[in-house]
Image: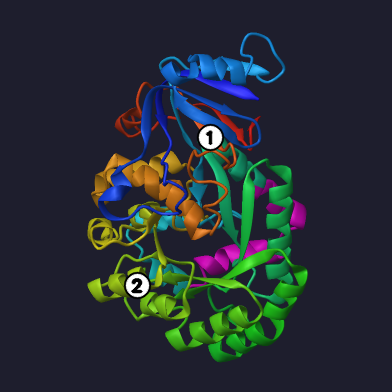
Amino acid sequence: MILLTNIASLVTVDASGGFCKTGPAMRDIGEIKNAAILFEHTIRWIGSMEEWNSTAFREWVDVDGGEAVTEEIDCTGMTVMPGFVDSHTHIAFAGSRSHEFARRLSGVPYSRIAAEGGGILTTMKAVRESSLDEIVEIGATLVSSAVEHGTTTFEIKSGYGLSAESELKLLEAIKLIGDETPADVHATFLGAHDVPPEYRSSPDQYIDLIVSDMLPKVREQGIATACDVFTDIGFFTVEQSETVLHAAQKLGLEVRVHADEIANIGASQMAARLGALSADHLEHSSIEDMVAMREKGVVATLLPGTAYTLRLPYPNARTMIDKGLIVALATDCNPGSCFTENMQTILSLACINMGMSIEEAITASTLHGAHALRIGSQTGSLEVGKHADLVIYDVESYTDIIYHFGTNHVYTVFIRGEEV
């Protein structure tokens, strides 16, 4: 067992066994000052140094040289928090779109770049031409960097292959990325990310291909646990999306939705009707959409890095929180619209540009990220019995992580009790 002592600020995000904290409760992050935490693969005990130094605990664990505690780390002047749960990424890809990024900054709209065969289709071409090993190398490098910045759990989507062969290759790459990292990795099938060139004039035929060919093969492969669809103007209609997601549910896959990013065509309402795990993006969601998602328990996953990169309006996080939605934060790390794996940066954008408090951002990026993946019983907060997924930051207070932005504050990371 490992014992962390003299922690200046221990942020537990304790939910008393629950999986979410909505409304004003999002600001209650369960901070304990001058704290200690004892863990092996799971968390054994949490409390203050005063409690730890009591006679009862001295009798329970022989701190003075017995076998129970194998390592003690003095965290004087440091902060400890749960590892970030990045519940929306596209880390499995190939190629680069930096040239398109430069064009957008010079004034060329994304719609024009996409019409010219760029955007998602640029990455599709690179994925189809790349080997499995090349895709794994890119993804594993990004995951490693993200872990160094405090992320301990990932969701990774396919979606850049847009053919049965290439989508299965991406899902296999996600599995191998997970095998190479101590972090927890969850795979989502996103065959309906865009319409490939060979079906551009007949998108409904591509939907038929996803339903009749891709989804059964994905289910047989057994890597993806969820299915996602990009439901928006220029991508897939609500009717097309429902066809895919209903088929996925019949095969036992959970569903997610890219919703309301470019325009509001009813995607988040659809997510509510289908009981989706999450609806993600939500830059153009209405009050009615928010109420529908809240009533069905759909996690509203906000991606401020994408709004920042594409110069879109930011999601209305303040209203969503005030309306009682379960709000999560994620990077949307991808080669086109948000190329960052750093969750510390995402929290900064959420606080500065979406009006979230630091405490709300912490809850959204840990406990609620875990709930978006429905693994809140295992991780997302520091509570006895949960995985010891925690990060030590070299700062006196959790507020310094946002206050002193643009640098990595991580001192070290533990995943399931192992220092990584």
Categorize mark 1 by other alpha carbons within 10 Å: few (<14), some (14-19), many (20+).
many
**Residue 133 magenta:** yes
Magenta stretch: helix, strand or loop mostly: helix
Residue identifier under label 2: 295
Give me the residue at 64% from left, 82% from top.
210
* Residue 8 visible to an observer of this rendering: yes
Separation of marks 2 and 1 at Cα, in angstroms: 32 Å
Quarter holding residue 57: top right
Q: Of 318 and 297, which appears nearest the observer? A: 297
Q: Foreground mark, 2 or 1? A: 2
Q: Which residues are magenta?
A: 116-139
Give me the residue at 48% from left, 59% from top.
372
Q: Position of residue 258 (x, y in %)?
A: 45, 69
Amino acid type shown at disc 1: Leu
Using the image, determine if residue 222 lies above or below residue 62: below
**Residue 390 circle label:** 1
Give me the residue at 64% from left, 14% from top.
62
What is the quadrant of the C terminus in the image?
top right
Q: Of 171 and 53, which appears nearest the observer? A: 53
What is the quadrant of the N terminus in the image?
top right
Q: Position of residue 294 (x, y in %)?
A: 34, 68
